[in-house]
Image (tube, rainbow, N blue to C red):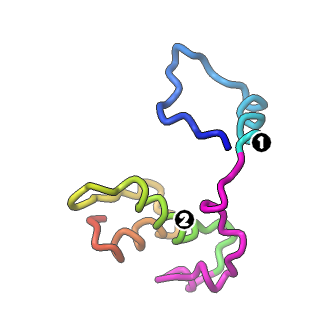
Amino acid sequence: MVKLQEKPISLKQGYYSPSKIIDIFKAKEIGKEWSFIEYKPSDTSKLTHCYHRYPAKFIPQLVEKLMDKYLIGIKVPHVNDLFMGSGTIIACAISRGYRA
């Protein structure tokens, strides 16, 4: 499995074409720990996520996994959800006691 580059690509390296970006992602293997394919809709309806069916909802398990990975070591994380679609990020942050 190829690990994604941690640092963002600088402007000095140039831009990738859309087809190049698609090729890069097709070459990446998704680790099983990041796959939620076995989850049923009822498994992904935590908190307020069962109020309405939204086909592109951000499942809470993914948000929680990302918070576990990137907010470790921060005493009182403050989470902002700039897009505020269905509120998954804010709901997960509040349920964990984070400032949101």
- For image coordinates 41% across by 62% down, the residue present is 68
Q: Main secondary structure of the magenta part?
A: loop
Q: Which residues are magenta?
A: 29-52
Instruction: Depth check: give the residue in front, 93 or 37.
Output: 37
Percent position of residue 50, x then y: 57, 85
The residue to which callout 2 is attached is 62
Q: Mark on residue 76?
A: none
> Is the C terminus in the top left, top right, bottom left or bottom right quadrant?
bottom left
Amino acid type of the residue that numbered disc 1 sits on in the rendered structure: Lys
The residue to which callout 1 is attached is 26
Which SS class for mark 2? Answer: helix
Q: Is residue 21 left or right of residue 70?
A: right
Q: Is residue 15 above or below residue 76?
A: above
| Circle 2 crowding by C-alpha within 10 Å: few under 14, some 14–19, many from 20 | some
Which SS class for mark 1? Answer: helix
Instruction: Depth check: give the residue in front, 24 or 89.
Output: 24
Q: Is residue 27 left or right of residue 52?
A: right
Percent position of residue 93, x then y: 36, 68
Percent position of residue 1, x then y: 68, 44
- For image coordinates 65% across by 79% down, the residue present is 53
Q: Residue furthest front?
A: 1
- For image coordinates 71% across by 33% down, the residue present is 21
Instruction: Depth check: give the residue in front, 30 or 97.
Output: 30
Q: Place residue 31 in its image quadrant.
A: bottom right
Percent position of residue 8, x then y: 49, 30
